[in-house]
Each structure stands twice: as structure tokens, then as C-alpha cells.
């Protein structure tokens, strides 16, 4: 479930500037079998993707130093097919978020929501890599 | 005629010699002398008959132009008193016996000539005076009529009072608005039309101004003929004479009800926008720790080192957290961080609103029918559209406390040549009374008493109008029940104005 096609655990980058949240999210994802790297700022997030192979990123929308949408843009620039989930404590996110992120989730809901979304995005990425390594991102379901 | 212009003096005698004598006597007077040797000749200026002196006098006086001509008879015959009376009756003013004494004749003619001139002058002055009276009366009438038409054409109610503050005149608008008459309204009776909550303060204020002859201004509700009240801005000015004494008061009452309502609406909508922003911030501050706590309990539940009882506690805590998250979303969810128009799926919005109302739908035992004929999108702001349909659906639900059927239709439509979406929401609730139908989109109109703000439909209409759309309703009686249907049309492509801060909490 938390494994890629080659059998290794998927690596997830979690970005949030609030420590408790970041730690708990890391534990949640590790508990689900993922390998988790964390970053508490824009800069450290970009440093991590430069050094490590990342399979998916979970980014907080509202951070000091720039919002999650901007970071998502940077990450996509670095790795075009990287699936990105944006989290927001606001009940609704601006429309442009949907354009760049692969999913967005309102904070405060059940933990399973995030886990299920990650699983879905990783499964899609696997299917895509089977098909064609140059394939475009799948269109969002309505 | 100039007051020194010569007077025409006609000398009549059948003896040319005498005429010459009279001329010589009267020439020094400088008047204009005319001669006639007979009555006939005398009348050549006037008439043409052979007549004696008396007849001549009669005829002269019969003519309107010569009625006041002085006639002096010169008689060689000794005149009896009867003759004199006869002469006077005919308007003669004097007699001179022959032989004529030149000084006497000249003096008499001079007196009469002068008298004639004065009379003419007097008549002229009199005529001028009469004309002036006519002119002034006409001016006054015109000014009065101008004042009246002005006073009746202004949109204000207007009135005038004596210096003692008793009102003696109102314009027509006052009577039209209040349904009163001048007799009912004379003096201080206007006080009975001021709203009872305001009358003491109003009277106090106006009396203070009256006491010191200062202009007065106040705002208060005045009762209309149907018993309802509207707000007026009232002003009164003292009108003073040249010596600075107040001769009357002139007052107006301007209807400011709509302005007042708009101001109040603005204040409310600003307050609501502020609340919306605050709600967004609070939601943000709650959701952040909520996520952390949820994750912590999720991990606790999954922790195999804990016994069954401890995991049960974690599960219970998790359930309550879910409820907390739901409430946060429901009450603090109306916050928009976006200033950009996006593609909005109305079916998603309608589902979303129905989800929010699900508990109440269940409690009221309301059956829901969804007929979505399209899954298409329109360009807009999701939150304000959600607000519109939440208002309409919440109203429908509240109209069915005893249960009923809520039917929601969504279809593509081309209303008045424009393509777009039509959404209709119908309920089988209490219906809308016909006397309310004209007012339901007005701000602060509510039939829900303390429960309603009276702003829901007003805001909804405002939002839909921004999309150049329409919102209409129909409420009909069917059997023993009512069917009320609100229909909204939103064009697919509208030049939407940027959203004003309508993000708000609406129930």
C-alpha cells in the first residue's frame, strides 16, 4: 500500500511551519508505512527536493514566507509530475489552488481523508509510470 | 394731459359782436377759445340740430365725454328762480346776467377752467391708483399661486406657522400623506402624528428653537394615513420682517426612510463582512489544532500497545472531534480568500447546501427531490452562490415545520435570449401571503420575527443581480396546501462585478 512498484516505501515531503502539526503528520504517515521527510520552511523544502527523490508532497497553504500554492509551483517546476496535496485551515481554498495542486484538503477533518487521498494519488502516479514516462498528468475527476 | 394744458372753452352767442367781446375778455386767461354763433354751430363739434341753450346743455351733458363740462349761461333776460333751477338741473354751474362785467366773466371762467384741470388731474391719479391696485392684486395672486404650486410640487411635506407656533397652513402633500384636513391639523395637532416614542423629544426640541427664534431640525417617524410610520428629516426656519421680528415659521418634512434603511443595511452588511472575515480567522485558528488533535487520536487508536479500553476512549474522542470539525465548517465556513472568478458547479453547490441542511431536513421530515439536468458550470464565486442557495433552501426548510417536499431543479436554459442555468427550489410549506409578496426582497422584511434578519433574500437578490441574473418566486394554493417556488436564472457569461464583502453568516 505504501510501497512503490519496485517494493520500496514511497517518500513523502511534509511542509508546515507549525512544529506540532508537522510532527503529528509525520507520525501519521509513517504509521501508514511511508517514508517521511519534513521541512518547516520554503527554503528547506526546496533544499530537500534538490537532494532527495520525492514521490509526493503535502504542503500547508498558509505559511510564513509564502503560501502553499507558490511552493507547489516551485516543486512542480523541479519535478513536473510530483503529486501535491495542499492543506488549508480555511474552509475553502481559492480557485487557483485547484489548478496547481492535485488535491486540497481542509484541515480538521478525519485523518483518513488525507491518507486516502495520498494513496489515490500515488496509485495514479504508478499507473502513469507504467503507461508512459512522458505522459501528461491525468485530468482531475469532477 | 399736462396740468397746465389749456382748457377748451366754447363761447356760444348769436351775436358776433358779443362773441368778439367774450374773446377779448377771456383771451388773457391763455385758454383755448372756440366760437359758435348758434347752438347748431356749437354742436358741430357734437351734433347738428337747432336748439336753445338748455337743450344744448342737455345734449352736451348727455355725451359721456362732456358730462363734466362746466356751462355758464349768459342771459339778457331776467332769469326767474325757476329758470335757474331748470338750468342747474341740466348741469349748469353758473349764470351771468347782462351786461357782462368782464372781470366777473373772466374770474368765473378762470375758476372753472382751473376746476376742470384739477378734476382731470384727480381722475388721472385715480385711474393710476386703480391700475396700481389691479396690478398689485394680480402680482399677489400670481405670487400666491406660484407659492402654492411650488409648495405642492416639492417632494417634501411643508407647513407654515404663526409666530406663536400654531400651524395655519400645510401643503397638499401633507394632507395626502397623513390623510388629515386643515381643520384637524390647525395649531399643535401635528404632535398626534409623531411616533409616540419620539414625540416628547421632538416637542422639546422644537419648543426650544421657537423660544429663541432659531432654525430647527430633527428626524423622527410620522404616521401615514394607513397607520404605518415613515422617517422624516424635519426642518423649520423663522421668517423675519425688516425689524428682525419673526412673522411666521416655514417648515418642511423630507422622507428619509429609504436613506435610513440603506444606511442601516450598509452598516449591517459591513458588520457582516467583518464577521465573515473574523469567522474565517477563527475557522483557521480552530482547524489547525483540530487537525493535529485528530491525527494524535488516530495514532492513539492505532497504537497496539494500548489496551482495548484506552483505544475506546480514543475512538470516542475522535467521534467528538469529527462533530466539532463539522460544526466549525458549518458555522465559520463562509470565508472567501479568493478574488478570482472560477468555474462553479451549481449541482455541487446545491448538494453541499443540502448536506448542510441534512439534519434539519431529517428533523422536519422533509423529502428531497433533486432533478439535475446538467452538471455544467458557470463562472462565479462559489461562496456567494452557496450563500444564495443556502438562503433559499433554508427558507424552504423553515417554511415546512410540519414536513413536506423540497424539490430542486437545475437545468440549462436560455432566458430572454441568454444562455445560462436555471435553478428552481420549491417547497410545500406555509406559502407567501400575497400582501407580503411585494416586500420579501426588501431589506429587513422578515416573517420569521426574532428568528430572521430580513436580509437573506435581499442579499440573495443583490448577488444574483451582480451576475446579471434574475430571481423570482411564485406561491400558489393547491388544495389545502401551498406550493412556493423560487426560480433563479444565472447567465453563463456575465460581467460579474468584483464581489463586495457579502461573505457572511446567514441562517
Image (cartoon, grey):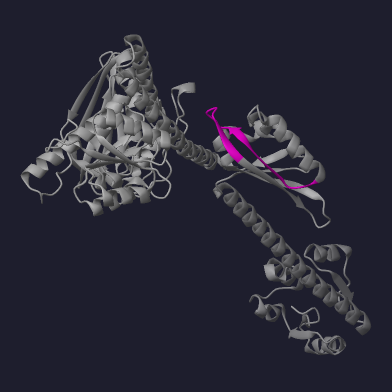
- Left or right position of B157 against B433: right
Instruction: Give the number of marks.
Output: 0
Segment tinted magenta in the rendering: B213-232
Q: Residue A141 is drawn in which quadrant?
A: top left
Residue B161 in the image, given as x and y percentages of width and height: 72, 42
Left or right: where does residue B291 sit relative to residue B29? left
Say which of B447 and B501 sits in front. Answer: B501
Residue at the (10%, 39%) spot, across then down: A127
Going by the image, does B297 lie left or right of B124? left
Q: Nearer the viewer, residue B439 or A54?
A: A54
Reply yes or no: does residue B47 show up in magenta. Answer: no
Q: Measuring 11% from the left and 37% from the top, which residue is drawn there?
A: A5
Q: From the image, which quarter does the N terminus of chain B lie in?
A: bottom right
Residue A55 position in % (x across, y down) = 21, 42
Q: Residue furthest top?
A: B309
Q: Quadrant of residue A101?
A: top left
Q: Position of residue B29 (x, y in %)?
A: 86, 85
Q: Is residue B216 magenta?
A: yes
Q: Quadrant of the C terminus of chain B?
A: top left
Q: Does residue B184 appear anywhere in the picture?
A: yes
Q: Position of residue B222 (x, y in %)?
A: 60, 34
The residue lying at 64 percent from left, 35 percent from top is B182
Comparing B345 with B138, the one in front is B345
User: Is B177 placed left or right of B324 in the picture?
Assistant: right
Q: Please, is residue A133 above or below residue B278 in the view?
A: below
A22 up-or-down from B106: above or below: above
Amino acid at each position: 500500500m505504501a510501497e512503490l512498484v519496485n517494493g520500496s516505501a514511497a517518500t513523502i515531503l511534509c511542509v508546515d511551519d507549525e512544529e506540532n502539526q508537522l510532527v503529528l503528520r509525520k507520525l501519521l504517515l509513517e504509521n501508514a508505512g511511508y517514508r517521511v521527510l519534513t521541512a518547516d520552511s520554503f527554503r528547506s523544502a526546496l533544499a530537500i527536493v534538490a537532494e532527495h527523490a520525492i514521490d509526493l508532497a503535502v504542503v500547508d497553504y498558509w505559511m510564513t514566507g509564502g503560501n502553499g500554492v507558490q511552493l507547489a509551483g516551485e516543486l512542480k517546476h523541479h519535478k513536473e509530475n510530483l503529486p501535491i496535496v495542499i492543506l488549508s485551515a480555511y474552509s475553502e481554498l481559492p480557485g487557483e489552488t485547484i489548478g496547481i495542486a492535485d488535491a486540497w484538503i481542509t484541515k480538521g477533518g478525519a485523518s483518513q481523508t488525507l491518507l486516502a487521498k495520498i494513496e489515490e494519488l500515488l496509485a495514479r502516479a504508478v499507473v502513469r509510470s507504467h503507461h508512459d514516462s512522458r505522459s501528461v498528468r491525468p485530468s482531475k475527476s469532477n | 394731459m399736462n396740468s397746465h394744458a389749456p382748457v377748451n372753452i366754447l363761447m356760444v352767442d348769436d351775436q358776433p359782436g358779443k362773441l368778439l367781446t367774450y374773446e377779448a375778455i377771456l383771451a388773457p386767461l391763455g385758454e383755448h377759445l372756440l366760437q359758435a354763433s348758434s347752438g347748431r354751430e356749437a354742436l358741430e363739434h357734437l351734433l347738428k340740430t337747432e336748439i336753445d341753450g338748455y337743450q344744448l346743455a342737455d345734449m352736451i351733458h348727455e355725451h359721456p365725454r362732456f358730462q363734466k363740462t362746466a356751462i355758464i349761461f349768459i342771459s339778457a333776460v331776467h332769469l326767474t328762480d325757476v329758470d335757474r333751477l331748470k338750468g342747474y338741473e341740466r348741469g349748469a354751474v353758473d349764470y351771468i346776467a347782462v351786461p357782462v362785467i368782464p372781470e366777473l366773466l373772466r374770474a368765473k371762467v378762470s375758476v372753472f377752467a382751473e376746476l376742470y384741470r384739477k378734476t382731470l388731474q384727480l381722475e388721472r391719479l385715480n385711474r393710476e391708483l386703480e391700475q396700481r391696485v389691479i396690478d398689485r392684486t394680480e402680482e399677489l395672486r400670481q405670487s400666491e399661486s406660484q407659492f402654492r404650486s411650488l409648495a405642492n410640487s416639492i417632494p417634501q411635506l411643508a407647513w407654515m406657522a404663526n409666530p406663536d407656533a400654531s400651524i395655519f397652513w400645510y401643503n397638499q402633500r401633507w394632507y395626502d400623506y397623513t390623510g388629515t384636513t386643515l381643520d384637524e391639523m390647525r395649531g399643535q395637532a401635528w404632535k398626534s402624528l409623531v411616533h409616540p416614542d419620539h414625540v416628547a423629544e421632538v416637542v422639546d426640541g422644537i419648543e426650544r428653537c421657537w423660544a429663541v427664534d432659531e432654525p430647527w431640525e430633527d428626524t423622527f417617524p410620522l404616521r401615514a394615513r394607513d397607520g404605518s410610520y415613515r422617517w422624516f428629516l424635519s426642518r423649520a426656519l423663522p421668517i423675519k420682517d425688516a425689524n428682525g421680528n419673526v412673522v411666521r415659521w416655514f417648515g418642511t418634512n423630507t422622507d428619509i426612510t429609504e436613506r435610513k434603511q440603506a444606511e442601516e443595511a450598509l452598516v449591517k452588511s459591513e458588520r457582516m463582512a467583518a464577521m465573515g472575515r473574523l469567522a474565517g480567522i477563527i475557522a483557521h485558528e480552530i482547524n489547525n489544532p483540530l487537525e493535529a488533535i485528530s491525527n494524535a487520536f488516530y495514532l492513539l487508536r492505532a497504537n497496539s500497545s494500548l489496551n482495548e479500553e484506552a483505544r475506546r476512549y480514543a475512538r470516542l474522542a475522535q467521534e467528538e472531534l469529527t462533530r466539532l470539525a463539522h460544526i466549525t465548517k458549518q458555522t465559520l465556513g463562509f470565508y472567501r480568500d479568493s478574488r478570482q472568478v472560477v468555474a462553479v458547479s451549481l449541482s455541487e453547490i446545491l448538494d453541499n447546501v443540502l448536506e448542510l441542511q441534512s439534519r434539519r431536513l431529517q428533523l422536519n421530515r422533509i423529502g428531497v427531490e433533486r432533478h439535475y439536468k446538467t452538471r455544467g458550470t458557470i463562472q462565479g464565486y462559489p461562496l456567494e452562490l452557496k450563500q444564495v442557495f443556502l438562503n433559499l433552501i433554508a427558507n424552504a426548510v423553515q417554511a415546512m415545520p410540519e414536513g413536506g417536499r423540497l424539490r430542486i431543479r437545475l437545468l440549462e436554459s436560455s432566458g430572454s435570449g441568454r444562455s445560462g442555468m436555471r435553478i428552481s427550489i420549491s417547497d410545500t410549506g406555509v406559502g407567501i401571503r400575497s400582501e407580503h409578496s411585494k416586500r420579501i426582497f426588501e431589506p429587513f422584511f422578515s416573517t420569521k420575527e426574532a428568528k430572521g434578519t430580513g436580509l437573506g433574500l435581499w442579499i440573495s437578490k443583490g448577488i444574483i443581480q451582480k451576475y446579471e441574473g434574475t430571481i423570482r418566486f411564485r406561491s400558489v394554493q393547491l388544495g389545502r396546501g401551498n406550493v412556493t417556488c423560487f426560480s433563479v436564472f444565472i447567465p453563463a457569461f456575465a460581467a460579474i462585478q468584483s464581489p463586495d464583502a457579502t461573505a457572511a453568516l446567514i441562517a
